[in-house]
Amino acid sequence: MLHAKADSIALRLALTGLVQSRSATGRWISNRGRKPCYRQLARLVTGATKLFERTVEKTAPNTAVHILLDASGSMGTNLDLAIRAGLGLVKGLQSIKGVNPALSVFPATSCGMGNFSVVPLIRHGQSLQNVESEAIGAIHACGCTPLFESLIYAGLMLRRQPCEKRVLIVITDGGVPPDQCAAKVKKLRESGVSVLGIQLGSENFLGDLIPDSVLIENIEDLKAALFGFAKSILL
């Protein structure tokens, strides 16, 4: 939890500026309108006609984001960074009005639930603060990589959200079955879901499956990746 708070600070500050610029109220002076601009009344003596203040409200983001966190056996030493990536992104996005993130872990055996392929850790609408730290600390790398089933689950959860934009982010070491998952990723994208990828390691094997993916090797790379994805989510 402490890592997530620290990792999300820069992201949250940058996102605040992005959202404010998108959702701010625009104002200008017009020769028609219902609300006179009293600062302009003195211009009547010059024959000026632009005396009314008009406004337009820009919409805030209305986006659901579902993060899939790979905790399979191959993750090994990368798992800590993967968890920090997932929690940091959730915490940063939860601070932005109009963004509804969730985080699920696969396989479920990594969370002590062997009967399922994927398990929700943070549901849509649930605050990260309400998640027990023991649940996060209990995640360990083990089992297979049921990404295909996890993509189906995340897509279903996203479709249930009343929003204008849907984003799916996969965090993995790249050891996934691309042939099996490629058709599902394509179908998600065709249905309007933006599919993004974060791969941990030294080489991006995920790019063939998810073109919009980045490679991170350390926490500094993570901050840049999170900010880059957040911009694509909000703008």
Image: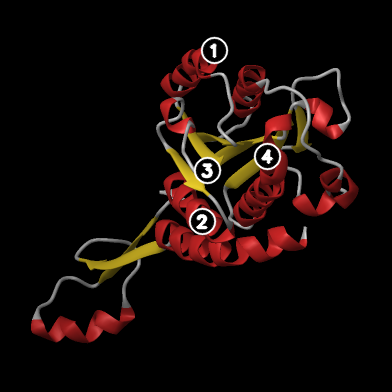
The disc labelled 3 sits on which kind of residue?
Asn
Q: Would you say 146 lies left or right of 108 here?
A: left
Q: Position of residue 12 (x, y in %)?
A: 57, 62
Q: Position of residue 99 (x, y in %)?
A: 58, 47
Nearer-the-camera pick, 160 or 112: 112
* Mark 2 in CB contact with mark 3 (< 8 angstroms): no
Circle nearer the N terminus (1, 3): 3
Nearer-the-camera pick, 163 or 111: 111
Circle nearer the N terminus (2, 1): 1
Which residue is label 3 attached to?
Answer: 62
The disc labelled 2 sits on which kind of residue?
Asp
Residue 185 visible in image:
yes
Circle nearer the N terminus (3, 4): 3
Which residue is label 1 attached to?
Answer: 180
Q: Nearer the viewer, mark 3 or mark 4?
A: 4
Q: Position of residue 210 (x, y in %)?
A: 45, 29
Q: Residues within 10 Å of mark 4 (few under 14, many from 20)?
A: many
- Figure quadrant of the N terminus: bottom right
Which residue is label 2 attached to?
Answer: 221
CA gap, disc 4 and disc 2: 22 Å
Q: Nearer the viewer, mark 1 or mark 4?
A: 1
